[in-house]
C-alpha cells in the first residue's frame, strides 16, 4: 500500500462516523482472512490498529468531556 493510500485513510478517519469505522473494520477483517500475502497481512494489521486506535481515542475523548461536564 502506497503513501497515497495511508494519506487517504488518515483523512477518512478524521471524518468517519463510528458506524463507518465499524463497517470498514468488518470489511478489512474479511480481507485479512482472504489473503496469504505476508506484506498485505502486515498492512491489514496496521489498518486494523489505526481503526482501533481511532475508536479508543474517541471513547476516551467522550469520557473526558463527560467527566468535565460533571465537575
Image: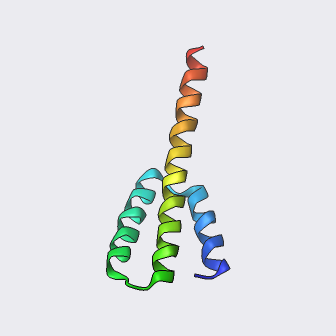
x and y percentages locating residue 64 in the rendered image:
58, 29
27 left or right, relative to 21: left
x and y percentages locating residue 65 in the rendered image:
58, 29
x and y percentages locating residue 38 in the rendered image:
46, 82
19 left or right, relative to 62: left
* Quadrant (top left/top right/bottom left/bottom right) for the N terminus: bottom right
Q: Is residue 30 above or below residue 50?
A: below
Task: Give whichever of 7, 17 is nearer the camera.
Answer: 7
Q: Is residue 59 above or below residue 5?
A: above
Q: Residue at x 62, y 64 (%)?
A: 10
61 left or right, relative to 17: right
59 left or right, relative to 32: right
Task: Give whichever of 7, 1 is nearer the camera.
Answer: 1
Task: Give whichever of 43, 30 is nearer the camera.
Answer: 43
Q: Residue at x 32, y 81 (%)?
A: 34
Q: Is residue 5 above or below residue 16?
A: below
Q: Residue furthest bottom?
A: 37
Task: Give whichever of 47, 24 is nearer the camera.
Answer: 47
x and y percentages locating residue 44 in the rendered image:
47, 72
Q: Residue at x 48, y 68 (%)?
A: 45
Q: Quadrant of residue 60?
A: top right
Q: How many marks?
A: 0
Q: Residue at x 35, y 64 (%)?
A: 26
Q: Which of the colour schemes (rainbow, by chain, secondary structure, one colour) is used?
A: rainbow
* Quadrant (top left/top right/bottom left/bottom right) for the C terminus: top right
Q: Residue furthest top?
A: 71
Amino acid at each position: 500500500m502506497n503513501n497515497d493510500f495511508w494519506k487517504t485513510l488518515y483523512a477518512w478517519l478524521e471524518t468517519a462516523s463510528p458506524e463507518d469505522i465499524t463497517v470498514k473494520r468488518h470489511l478489512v477483517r474479511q480481507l485479512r482472512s482472504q489473503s496469504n500475502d505476508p506484506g498485505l497481512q502486515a498492512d491489514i494489521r496496521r489498518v486494523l490498529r489505526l481503526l482501533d486506535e481511532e475508536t479508543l481515542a474517541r471513547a476516551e475523548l467522550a469520557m473526558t468531556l463527560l467527566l468535565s461536564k460533571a465537575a
